[in-house]
Amino acid sequence: MKVLLVSDSHGDNITLQRLVAMYPQMDLYLHAGDSESDEEAIKPFISVRGNCDRYKDFNDYFLIPTPYGKMYVQHKPHVANLLTKMREVKIFVHGHTHIRRNETINGVMWINPGAISYARDCFDGSYAILTIEQNAVQVEYYTVK
């Protein structure tokens, strides 16, 4: 399973569409919140609601089956420990911090693609491609150009 993962685009829909054109063969286009756009404007991405999307009609979270196990997606990471345990999650995807993240905590992979807009790490803007297989998840980060 191939996933193009973005977060925190804050209205930069042009970059989102450029990424779709660059990667037309993804199984899933996933936005971890704060698109500041409606569903139609960010298609084919599906998105959770971020703190800057409070008036948008997005879900607060997704629980997505993958070959590796359940993937839980929500914008803010602060309540994830409890939720990942309750739902037997193997992959937790979030945004909000604008900082890339790929670490395993208590057997759960925590992944943040960074931010398309207003990055807070040393990268100008970033996204990730996840390759999810039954026994492994590969996370590759790329800088928006």
Image (cartoon, rainbow, N blue to C red):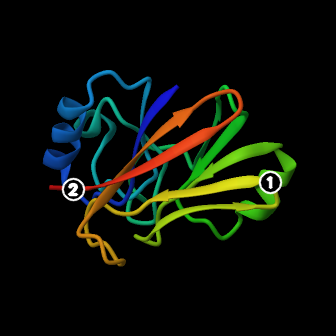
Q: In percent of the image, x 69 and y 32: which residue is there?
A: 68
Q: Amino acid at mark 1?
A: Gly
Quadrant of residue 132 in the image? top right
Which label sits on residue 144? Answer: 2
Residue 92, position in %: x, y?
A: 64, 51
Q: CA distance from mark 2 to mark 1?
A: 30 Å
Q: In percent of the image, x 27 and y 39: which residue is there?
A: 42
Q: In percent of the image, x 83 and y 43: which residue is there?
A: 88
Residue 13, position in %: x, y?
A: 19, 47
Q: Amino acid at mark 2?
A: Val
Q: In percent of the image, x 44 and y 23: which residue is there?
A: 27
Which SS class for mark 1? Answer: loop
Q: Nearer the viewer, residue 117 or 33?
A: 117
Which SS class for mark 2? Answer: loop
Q: Are marks 2 and 1 in contact (CB under 8 Å)?
A: no
Q: Is residue 141 above or below residue 115?
A: above
According to the picture, the residue beneath numbered tag 1 turns out to be: 107
Q: Is residue 63 above or below residue 120?
A: above
Quadrant of residue 69 in the image? top right
Which label sits on residue 38? Answer: none
Q: Nearer the viewer, residue 131 or 46?
A: 131
Q: Nearer the viewer, residue 106 or 35?
A: 106
Q: Nearer the viewer, residue 101 or 45?
A: 101
Q: Is residue 101 above or below residue 37?
A: below
Q: Residues within 10 Å of mark 2 (few under 14, many from 20)?
A: some
